[in-house]
Amino acid sequence: MKLIKAADYNEMSRIAADYVIAKLHENPQIKLGMATGDTPKGLYRELVSDHRKNGTSYKGVQTFNLDEYIGLSSRDSQSYRYYMDSHLFDHIDIDKTNTHLPKGDVEDAFAEAEAYEQLIRDSGKVDLQILGLGGNGHIGFNEPGTPFGSTAHVVELTVATRSANAKFFGSLDLVPRRAITMGIATIMESKEILMLVSGEGKSSALCRLLEGPVEEGFPASVLRRHPHAMVIADDAALSLCSTQFAEAKC
Ligand SMILES: O=P(O)(O)OC[C@H]1O[C@](O)(CO)[C@@H](O)[C@@H]1O
């Protein structure tokens, strides 16, 4: 796993954007795996700004999001579909029919999870998967203990994850209890993975990812088995990690 150090959130976002844009120029039909949450907002802001300034086109791009809350429709301002439209898709020239997320407002969430896995498989491999890091090590909504072999599935969210996301809903009670997420095997099928980590609050999780064992109890640790995984972390996120690792520039 490769580690790139950034001074702060803005630098992390710019480095990530430059990387994504370079990949997009190499392959205008790139399949991007998208993440939500606070962390990638700066990346999306940079992509929008580059699109406006330099005209980078997304006409041939397909996207596949990691997850969606069960029970929220695409019009709900807390749904991940709404997040993606408002932070990125509405501001670039992407064909929205090429942007994919699991549907949260379906009758049969289990069937939707299976259909989403199939859709990703039928589309070929995701070229570049963007990830954030949950404080408990979750990636997508794969909570600690999720088997590394898991494909897209319905998940009961932990209180830790719901509490972390209560900031978006205003109260814990309003955070949905279930979600559909790509599985860990789905994520690991991507040709390349780019994880973004920012802030002191993520530092102990980041150290465990960089220095701890690879184990299902800490889902993100699986990335150490991926041949092309890269983490861009800012100084605050690296602040608790061992000096030796924190100073390593790969
Ligand atoms: O970027 P944040 O808001 O810290 O969230 C980290 C991770 O948690 C999630 O929001 C899910 O809880 C992911 O989508 C995200 O990658």
Image (cartoon, rainbow, N blue to C red):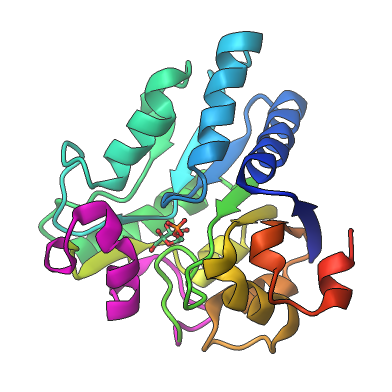
How many numbered markers are drawn? 0
* Residue 228: percent from left, percent from top: 77, 59
Image position of 200 (left or right of 193): left
Q: Which residues are magenta?
A: 145-174
Residue shown at the point (16%, 51%) measured from the top left: 72
Q: Does 20 lie within the magenta span?
A: no
Q: Looking at the image, in which quadrant does ligand 1 appear?
A: bottom left
Give the quadrant of the N terminus: bottom right
Q: Nearer the viewer, residue 143 or 44?
A: 44
Vertical placement of residue 239 versus 97, above or below: below
Give the quadrant of the C terminus: bottom right
Image position of 38 (left or right of 212): left
Residue shown at the point (20%, 62%) measured from the top left: 109
* Residue 249: percent from left, percent from top: 89, 59
* Residue 62: percent from left, percent from top: 51, 33
Vertical placement of residue 142 versus 21, above or below: below
Residue shown at the point (28%, 71%) measured from the top left: 163
Q: Is residue 158 visible?
A: no
Vertical placement of residue 236 versus 213, above or below: above
* Residue 112: percent from left, percent from top: 26, 57
Q: Does 168 lie within the magenta span?
A: yes
